[in-house]
Amino acid sequence: MMNRPIYLDYNGTTPLHPEVMETMRIYMDREFGNPSSSHWYGIAPRRAVENARREVAGLLNCDPREIVFTSGGTESNNHAIKGSVWARRARGNHIVTSTVEHPAVLEVCRYLEKWGFETTYLSVDAYGRVDPQAVEKAIRPETILITIMHANNEVGTIQPISEIARIAKAHEIVFHTDAAQSTGKIETDTKSLGIDLLSVAGHKIYGPKGIGALFVKRGTVLDNFCHGAGQEMGFRGGTENVMAIAGLGTACELMRRDFTVQREKMRSLSLLLASGIMSQLTDVRLNGHPELRLPNTLSLSFKGVMANRILEEIGLEIAVSAGAACHSDKVDISHVLKAMNVPLEWAGGTLRFSLGRMTTEAEIQKALPIIVDAVKKIRKEL
């Protein structure tokens, strides 16, 4: 039986933590009731949902009543953006965002433009950071929402969210941040950040797929996302996915319990991987901010080498993501690398290595020669 590749794509998704699976199993089996039921079978599921709400709130430092469960980060972003602008349509029609957002933000803005909304897409610097002054300059009298991600999923760059939040507050504009990649890796204290809305994705923090959460600061008005029987404080109708919600709660508990240890571990292993590659290969470029970056995320460009060619060499041994795809007639560069103006000869050879709590030093030491040898082999062929 072939050994499974070393998994270094935790920003893509994470495996379920064993404690999360144990929690979920309870609600797959004996505690199957509807949490809205008034009889005995609804008691345990209802308690599970509210306990999970407390755990998510604990990780984000907010009131449990400010947490709305969703089907994932994409729905959380959709609800935050659409719900905000439709609730404020009488005040204006302008949205401010950035060019490096996840498609779950960019595509929502593009959709809303069909309905008369206007979007300003702010450029970023060479590190992928938004300038808070550019945010302030983009604000118009009709601006009703600012949405800037907390940390980038491709290069890991952390945005100056607190500074942007102060600007938004001064202009009385609702501010949303997509924290799908930052939750559990860096501090996501809603009070310190000063945001009104924050999105969480369960499968990025060792919880199940198909579950997420949206922080809605008390007093923030949103249009309902899904109409029905009034679940989730009326924001999202539909019987709750108790099994997944309970799993998300346990995942958030785990993130909070060993946050510092895991953060430092991921930072240490990421530095080990980066230094190991760069000490043995020339023409390697780090994308994203060298310091203000997620501790687990490493975006490297190998000059003159195509990313899909590297994947062909290492794919059976290491699982990573590419920042570009080479086709017969063109090279497709990710919108993030384009926004950062990474030159084509570098961008075409970009790989994203993202580490997680299951990553070991032994795996990094094993991965290093595989990556280095693959790049050296390809360069010899050119």
Image (tube, grey):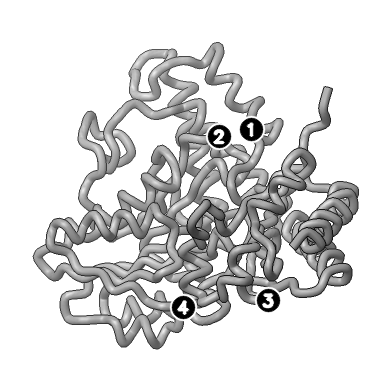
Which residue does the numbered mark 3 point to in the structure image?
Answer: 291
Q: In the drawing, does residue 98 fall left or right of residue 162? A: left
Viewer-side residue, 320 vs 264: 320
Q: Circle 3 sits in a helix, a strand or a loop, which is it?
A: loop
Mark 1 lies on a secondary structure that is helix
Mark 2 vs mark 4: in front: 4
Tell me which amino acid carries mark 1: Val
C-alpha gap between disc 1 and disc 2: 8 Å
Label tally: 4
Residue 226: image location, x then y, percent = 25, 38
Looking at marks 1 and 2 on the same chain, the residue that comes earlier in the sequence is marked by 1
Quadrant of the snapshot with the N terminus? top right
Q: Residues within 10 Å of mark 2 (few under 14, many from 20)?
A: many
- Return the residue at label 2: 208
Q: Are marks 1 and 2 in contact (CB under 8 Å)?
A: yes
Q: Which residue is mark 1?
A: 20
Question: What SS does tag 2 mark?
Answer: loop
Which numbered disc flags the more N-terminal residue, 1 or 4?
Answer: 1
The residue indicated by pointer 4 is: 124
**Res. 228 image quadrant:** top left
Which residue is pictured at 64% across the width and 27% down the height?
A: 21
Q: Amino acid at mark 2?
A: Pro
Q: Are marks 2 and 3 in contact (CB under 8 Å)?
A: no
State the image coordinates of residue 246 (x, y, percent, origin top left): 53, 32
